[in-house]
Amino acid sequence: MVHVYRPLPVERLKLLVFDLDGTLIDSAQDLCNSVNAALGQFNRGPMPDPAIAGFVGNGAPMLMRRSLAMADGLAPEQVDENLLSEAYAFFLQYYREHKLDFTYAYDGVVEALAALKELHDAAGTPRTMAVLTNKPVRPARGICEGLGMADYFLHIYGGDSFPVKKPDPFGLRSLMEETGSSPDETVMIGDSQVDVATARNAGAWSIGCAFGFGVPTLMDHKPDVLVDRASDWTAALNPAKPCPAKP
């Protein structure tokens, strides 16, 4: 189902930018396994998967920082920086090797991407699709390639592709500049308040996904449109059948 809070100018949209974790893919198990492998390497016991998954969205360094803090009963800013550096390096190496052990595309994602590729703007121009994630770019691209999604995207950018991460709008604005798209012609699609805030900070539109990791905080920054599943993207972005706003 599509829930519209502010109608999108679907006929004008040229650039569709997707988050990755919790939006295109369910990567929770591999991320949790990698974090717990790193914790074990540094003599910390495993943390519950749901707690670790709740830390996803602000980049891998913050994921590891929060997990170490939880393991040691500290605030994130109290984590020893040398320990964090070593644990993050271990996490990253482990994750690169295990990123596709359990990770999969959500139901309907590949089909929705194929359908969106066929939807044009009002001028008949095919829309451009891209990925902007806070996950490091190498595993992000490897996952998209491994799951057969990479060819749908002009660019796949990660948390280390730019000097700053979402919700800073730098990455999204860079994509706009590269594709010649204005904020009013751009929509950010993601599962968390980080993605909605990124869109707001860039002056772009937002679609929230109510099936990902970030659902508990998603409505902290209400998206313009909320979808219940990936297959709803096509309905939300079809210029021939615009969705009415909620009364």
Image (cartoon, rainbow, N blue to C red):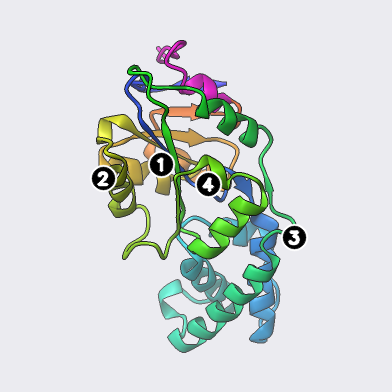
The residue that label 3 is drawn on is 101
Q: Please, what is the three-letter code of the amino acid marked with disc 1?
A: Asp
| Separation (CA) of disc 4 from disc 1 | 10 Å
Q: Earlier in the sequence, mark 4 or mark 1?
A: 4
> Where 239 falls versus 151 (above or below)?
above
Left or right of 198, for residue 99: right
Q: Earlier in the sequence, mark 2 or mark 1?
A: 2
| Separation (CA) of disc 3 from disc 2 | 36 Å
Q: Residue at x 45, y 72 (%)?
A: 76
Q: Please, what is the three-letter code of the amino acid marked with disc 2?
A: Glu
- What is the x, y in percent for residue 227? 53, 28
Left or right of 151, for residue 222: left
- Which span of residues is magenta-colored? 232-247
Q: Which mark is residue 214?
A: 4
Q: Are marks 3 and 1 in contact (CB under 8 Å)?
A: no
Q: Dot 1, how many residues are within 10 Å of its Cα: few (below 14), some (14-19), or many (20+)?
A: few
- What is the x, y in percent for residue 82? 47, 88
Q: Quadrant of residue 33?
A: bottom right
Q: Secondary structure at mark 4?
A: loop
Q: Earlier in the sequence, mark 3 or mark 4?
A: 3
The residue that label 2 is drawn on is 177
